[in-house]
Image (cartoon, helix red, strand yellow):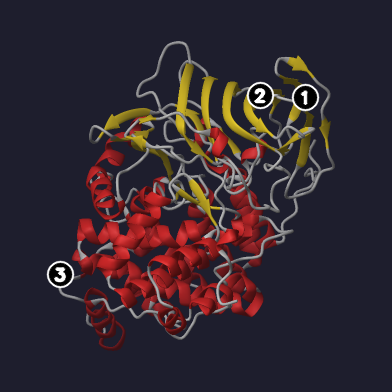
Amino acid sequence: MKYPSILFVILASWLGFSCNNSKSEEVKKDDVTDYVNDPHSYAKPNTAVVTHLNWDAEVNFDSERIRAVAEWEIKAKDEAKEIIFDTYGLNINKVMVDGEAVDFKLGSFKEELGRPLSIPLSEGAKTVSITYETTDSARALQWLDPEQTAGKEIPFLFTQSQAILARSWIPTQDSPGIRFTYDARVKVPSNMMALMSAENPQSKNTSGEYTFSMPQPIPSYLMALSAGDVVFKSISERTGVYAEPSLLDTSVYEFQDLENMVQAAEGLYGPYAWGQYDIIVLPPSFPFGGMENPRLTFATPTILAGDRSLVSLVAHELAHSWSGNLVTNATWDDFWLNEGFTVYFEHRIMEEVYGRDYSEMLASLTRDELQEAAAEMMKEIPEDTKLKLNLEGRNPDEGVTSIPYNKGYFFLRLIEEEVGRERFDEFLKNYFQENKFKVMTTEGFIDYLMANLLTEEQANRLQIKEWIYEPGLPDNLPVVESDRFAKVDEAQKKILEKNLYPASGVAEAWTTHEWLHFINHLPKDISQEKLAQLDAAYGFTQSGNSEILAAWFQPTIRNNYEPVYPRVESFLIQVGRRKFLTPTYRALLESDKEEMAMDIYEKARPNYHAVSRETMDDLLGYEEEGEESNPA
């Protein structure tokens, strides 16, 4: 069989759901029919599934706990005897079904999955109410002391639910293939504002109580909460920025093109379906560049470069409003369907707003990163260089490498080059509209692709099977040519070979991307003397641009350029973004600086979110004394 049957496509969705800006029609829950088996969830949604959440919570910063009631509306088959939720380290106090208290059972603990919560159902049961409290094992939550914030006076809380961490702060059916709507009431201290992946307030109130509504169905990995001293400023009628007061003006300046990006995205692939699109700039311990929580993108402050040069990250998170949030991977094995599409869409948005020469610089950097990552991974974990992954028995976070992002992007770019941009745009627009608020498998996408765009001859020529199911990079990886990078190469040659630095105004006009290309293409064995000359000329070690600084750490650490060491330490202590931490700690290890790496990590680890801590613990072989391995 050349292509898997379309029977594998997941249509676990609410058909007929439509939305425009902030209003939506009632979800047709009876249309929920079939779900794929998800090895990363205990839930059995084909027997009993959640459809709507009413969440009532109080956030206690003194105890660093959330006490809450999660009341779920459910849909169960007549023969269903129980409904199963995913939990991780939650203290379950009481469970009620249709208002009556029932016994419940917590199953055995598994390190990555937590414990199943089994609740008995009577025939015709409609609601399940779970009273509970989070614990120290809530890996999604990061509680920040005041000194870890920009304002230094008020603590802060944020969540990170992707991939399967939502179960550590809400008892839920924690699979990307299960969607639900939600309403919430959240109580926080009166000097804070609470925000969620929902309709949000734009100013603080005196009570500290906030209500939220998410009328479009989302999977649990898009559940999000933050609470702290934040303020809001609008950019347009439907876009705006939340940040700590001292960062607000800087953030608004950086994201001034937000509305233009939304319009560019809509022009490509159809109306924005979520109403409001806002960004919150979180404290620097946030483990990712951004998280595409619907209506409220979480963003790292490391993108505040002062010149809007790093806003491609915003374009990426915005693009998720279509690829990922609107059409979602059915399981984490299909993660590339979220991220590969999003990188492709991100580059198209950047091209639309800033021009082709700009977006091709991004594409060139993406290609370099892909080739480097694939070569490294082929030595150790070649199976993870496939687009379609097999993560059963593993933490799905292990699949969050650059492969689903960048190999996925070039696979889609290859198809565009084959059929032409006009046809491919029409195909993607229809794909998003026909499958909105549904989930998709890799096999389902292949069937859709073959039914609506490619012939078998084209599919064979493009080597689709090799791209998706084989490790490594096929020999038809698209080539990227950047005129702007060619000029950087010319300048670098003059600097390195003739010691002729670019005339005033040349290098000064380079964007972050040109500087990254320059640094990334320095000789691997560059001398300390030349590094010092470059540092004196361009001030890399003292750069306030996190992307440039993290790139500069690679050649300097590996070539023992000692003046950079204090900056490396301060950066690793202050910044928790995993994209920067991993290569920097790895450079220390691979250049025989393990003692330095461990000394820094001891100081920095308390500032990192659990997502970053787990990756760095594994990289560095770190074990904390007294760490719990089997939470309640």
Q: Name which of mark 1 and mark 3 comes first in the sequence.
A: 1
Q: CA distance from mark 3 to mark 2?
A: 71 Å
- Circles 1 and 3, Cβ within 8 Å, touching? The answer is no
Location of residue 53 with respect to 501 vertically, above or below? above
Q: Residue at x 65, y 41 (%)?
A: 139
Amino acid type, mark 1: Ser
Location of residue 120 with respect to 277 vertically, above or below? above
Q: Quadrant of the N terminus?
A: bottom right
Q: Name which of mark 3 and mark 2 comes first in the sequence.
A: 2
The tag on residue 122 is 1
> Which element is circle 2 on?
loop
Provide the residue designation for mark 3.
504
- Neighbours of disc 2 within 10 Å: few (<14), some (14-19), many (20+): some
Amino acid type, mark 2: Lys
Q: x%, y% of residue 244?
A: 39, 32
- Neighbours of disc 3 within 10 Å: few (<14), some (14-19), many (20+): few
